[in-house]
Image: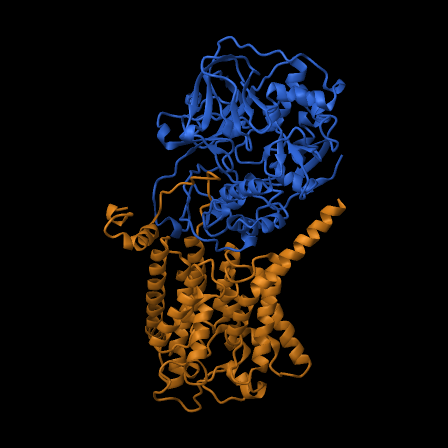
Chain colours: A blue, B orange
Amino acid sequence: MSKTIVLKKGLNIPISGVAEKRLSKTVTSEVIAIQPSDFKGFLPRLLVKEGDTVLAGSPVLSDKKNPDIIVASPLSGTVKEIVRGEKRKLLAVLIQTDTEQKSLDFGIRQPENLSAEEIKTALLESGLWPFLIQRPYGVVADPKACPKAIFISAICSAPNAADPEFAFETELSAIQTGINALNKLSEGGVHVSFEEKTFAGSPLSRLKGIHEHLFRGKYPVGNVGVQISHISPIRKGDVVWTISLQGCAAIGKLFSKGVCDLRRRVAVSGPMAIEPAYISTVPGTPMNCLKAFYSTNEENVRFVSGDVMSGKNVGKDGYLGFFDNTITLIKEGTEKELLGWIRPFRFNQYSADHTYFNWCLGWLTPKKKLDMDTNLHGGPRAFVMSDSYYAKHLPMDIYPLYLTKACLAGDIEKMEQFGIYEVLPEDLAICEYTDPSKNNIQDIIAKGIDLMLKEMA
Amino acid sequence: MNKIFEKGGKLYWLHSTIDAFETFLHVPGTVARKGAHIRDAVDLKRIMIIAVIAAAPAALFGMWNVGYQYSLATGISWNILQEFWYGFLKVLPLYLVSYIVGLAIEFASAQIRGEEVNEGYLVSGFFIPLIVPVDVPLWMLAVAVAFAVIFGKEVFGGTGMNIINPAILTRAFLFFSYPNHMSGENCWIAGASENLVDCYSGATPLALAANGMDALTNAHIQYTPDFWTMFWGGVPGSVGETSVIAILLGAFILIWTGVASWKIMLSSVAGAVVVGGIANLAGLSDVPFWYHLVMGGFAFGTVFMATDPVTSAQTEPGKWIYGFLVGAICIIIRLYNPGYAEGMMLAIFLGNIFAPLIDHIVVNLHIKAKNKKIATL
């Protein structure tokens, strides 16, 4: 048993709409989408044309830089439409799904008996390779790279995110097979982080062949980037891979059943979700399949694929992202609030500081969750508060404001010094949440990472 | 918002101003477009209003004290409300000048930059009348405020980008440009040229103590210059700086709400105690070090001026060093400056200038230590 890593910094934001741990339905949409924008660093080349039939696991897109990396169709069907945007940029491939699902047969194999190369080939062929994310920069992993280690987070700390214990209740053996396969890909082995509190009773604690790490803390303790920075921080020149549990499960099913099966339990949550619960579905499922979860006034709802802190606003016509197993429905906060900033209390709003008397509401009703909306609660300003104000809830050994300002200035050397290799935008989401100057810190970091990718290529 | 204020509209040149009033009245209905989909309820308006509320006890006490000092000096017997009213009427013009001049410049520069008006001056403008003598001529105050806001803040890019606290810069400008009106015995008590009582003195306890404890305790003056009087604040001085009780109340608000750093406050006191204590032990000064904590602008500067998040140190270790430096330099100046008894203004000024250097060293040491630690893993 390894030592528990206790993170003192962190913040649990009490937003309402936690998904109840029950499977409300299995969704198979008539149309699903494959979106190249889900994969960072991926330059899509189209492998299908309208009218082609595909099976679950058939290649749909490949990477122009590395044609071995493909993205496969999660379900079988016919290519209905290729959606392009400005300058013919490929936005999505829409697939009309079959009522009776068929999958490409990749053959049942024991990953223990395969070499690293054979496993890599199997993952690349089946379109599961993009589940592996390479750090620094959070791009799709390079098959030629030798990662220091592979990291998995089995903690959900983001507000209303899917609970791993329930979401992977039935996938334990698949995850185990997946880990066995991943173990061959890195000499440093597979590192899995668990929440200390629930570890003993969790079925996930039975996983074998892993380096286990126990964490205790508040959001963002579940971010794999935060965990890596406490287990083995990324230095310049290091390469590590991360993968989600749903990725592990899909890889496991590839070897144990011989199919490409991306079906997963997805938490539909958030203050606007009616009876929030889990559904079973595949990535690319359109949001309009969730009609049962939101009332008719969809104009007022923001559809977020992912958690509320770092997910993507996909809109009511959007689709579930490849990596996501949470959908958050939240109200668009477009209403003006009379003299809001000077009130002693602001009900239904949360502040991590004590500048509102909401802290005493928190004492009176500690379990109360609030129906938060997307209002900025202020206008954008220059950074005024000091670095330590931003670092207050960030459990990483970096200076977040210095890093953000280095990214704004585009100063590569300073970005390196201040730890750009260790972070992805999602890791600084908590700083963005608490920022009284209402800057889009995640966007600034993302642009900084893009600059690094361009300059260091 | 009305169309004529939008880009291309006739009154576009007024849009920052209109926007400022609009957002003053309502929290706007803008939503988070990128990144985290929920945001904390706190914004800069809230943080700034908390700073103003925290300084309000000092301001109210200061107004009363202006009247109280006047009644002591002239021998008029007034009740507490009369004293307050007299002080209020004296301090109100300072506030009007501070806000009208400062906000006009702030609004104009926001308009030129095409940004929203930043709330920073709401706080600076509230502090400025509290750190000047009540009898400062209004035109001087106006010139000083204009100088500080333009050259201390706007040329750097506005609130958040400035190096020196604009309120401190206002006072420094006044001090160096018009020293006759900022020091000596004739500026601290309002209307000090009228019928005065016997043994009247306009000198502050700090000025008296510059000549040693004997000069302070044996002074024939109309107020009692002992520790507790200075602690509750019934002595002459700049408008808001005299009452340590009112300032401590403000410190409590600032620390509890998380708006200002307790580390800076504590280390500033520590710096003053260390230097003052050494001076006592070495026999350099017979003024006990705890007197320095309640005299002059030390308390107000420590709580409200040194803790400005923009111009103080950014990093946690940096805050300890910065605060200590401010407290220590203040007492060193008080002990060694023969011309002027007060040292807090210059100490904060120097602290502001050194803060980026302190942070630079702290951050670089941290990066080095971290690289070393990772290398051994």
Question: Which residue of the protein is positioned furthest toward the bottom in this rendering?
Answer: B198
Closer to the camera in the image, A81 or B41: A81
Q: Is residue A107 above or below residue A90?
A: above
Closer to the camera in the image, A365 or B292: B292
The quarter in which the C terminus of chain A is drawn is: top right
The quarter in which the N terminus of chain A is drawn is: top right
Rendered location of residue A147, percent (x, y)? 69, 33
Query: Which of the 4 image quadrants contains residue B183?
Result: bottom left
Rendered location of residue B84, percent (x, y)? 36, 73
Rendered location of residue B123, percent (x, y)? 42, 62
Rendered location of residue B200, percent (x, y)? 43, 88
Query: Which of the 4 image quadrants contains residue A235?
Result: top right
Q: Residue at x 36, y 73 (%)?
A: B143
Q: Is residue A192 visible?
A: no
Q: Is residue B284 visible?
A: yes
Left/right placement of residue B217 relative to residue B100 reads right
Q: Residue at x 61, y 79 (%)?
A: B288
Question: Which residue of the protein is positioned furthest toward the top in this rendering?
Answer: A100
Number of marks:
0
Q: Is residue A413 above or below residue B251?
A: above
